[in-house]
Amino acid sequence: MASQAAASAFNGNMKKALAGLKRINLEGLRWRVFDAKDQVLGRLASQISTVIQGKDKPTYAPYRDDGDMCIVLNAKDVRVTGRKMTDKFYRWHTGYIGHLKERSLKDQMAKDPTEVIRKAVLRMLPRNKLRDDRDRKLRIFPDSEHPFGDRPVEAYVMPPRKVREMRPRARRAMIRAQKKAEQQEQGGNDKRKGKKREVEADLTA
């Protein structure tokens, strides 16, 4: 009943959402939910690839597929840094002579935003026999709805972003720029005070 209710609440492509699920041994796996809203694409993909390989578990081994199920929501709201939205391109070849196709990240987000996250995650996984099985554990949805409401899902908390300390040379340059700005402000104030004193002296004379 719960699975039917969850499926009825989901308005997306049910066949695509459940494809290949029977080929996965779900016993003992956790269902982790990633919210991609306002998350940077690369940082999100690195966390998903870690969970999908099972690297966050003490029992991790590179030859075993111990990763958990990953459900990614709000794929259409993922962010990128810099000018990647227009400068990043996905290229593929059809097999015919001269048929090299390309599509910008902006066009891919408009066409199918789930493929953007899927490509980012798959390109972080090792190219071995476990790659297809790990791909089946990744379920990406463009909105906040998913058909796995009957499963014991748990939200994944993204780790805080580690800001690298400023390098000494850059720090010194910043301090010099601040001192220069303060000196310019003080010099401007002194000039104004001097002009004000001259005006007062003229009035008194």
Image (spheres, grey):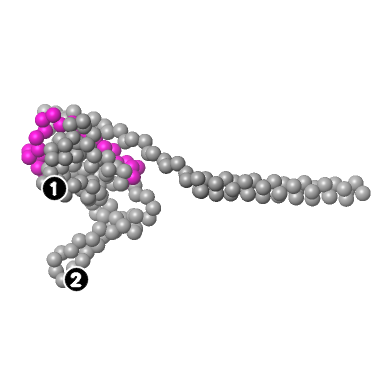
The reply, left or right, for residue 178 in relation to residue 61 is right
Kindly indicate the quadrant of the structure image that contains residue 78: top left
Distance CA(mark 1)–CA(mark 2): 30 Å
Residue at horizontal 30 percent and vertical 33 percent from the top = 157
Q: Does the magenta stretch include residue 32?
A: yes
Q: Where is residue 79 in the image (x, y as percent from the top left)?
A: 34, 47
Q: Nearer the viewer, mark 1 or mark 2?
A: 1
* Disc ID at residue 47: none
The vertical placement of 61 against 84, above or below, is above
Which residue is the extreme one toward the bottom?
A: 97
Q: Is residue 149 visible?
A: no
For disc 1, the marked residue is: 128
Instruction: Tell me whether the residue at label 1 lies in contact with that at label 2, contact meaning CB atoms closer than 8 angstroms.
Output: no
Secondary structure of residue under mark 2: loop
**Residue sitting nearer the eye, 69 or 151:** 69
Kindly indicate the quadrant of the structure image that contains residue 66: top left
Q: Position of residue 160 (x, y in %)?
A: 36, 36
Quarter holding the N terminus is: top left
For disc 2, the marked residue is: 98
Which residue is the extreme one toward the right?
A: 205
Residue at horizontal 13 percent and vertical 31 percent from the top = 3
Q: Can residue 155 be seen in this view?
A: yes
Q: Residues within 10 Å of mark 1 (few under 14, many from 20)?
A: few
Q: Where is residue 38 in the image (x, y as percent from the top left)?
A: 35, 42
Q: Which amino acid does label 2 sit on?
A: Gly
Q: What stretch is highlighted in magenta?
A: 16-41
Residue at horizontal 34 percent and vertical 55 percent from the top = 84
Residue at horizontal 21 percent and vertical 43 percent from the top = 140
Secondary structure of residue under mark 1: loop
Q: Where is residue 188 in the image (x, y as percent from the top left)?
A: 71, 49
Q: What residue type is labelled 1?
A: Asn
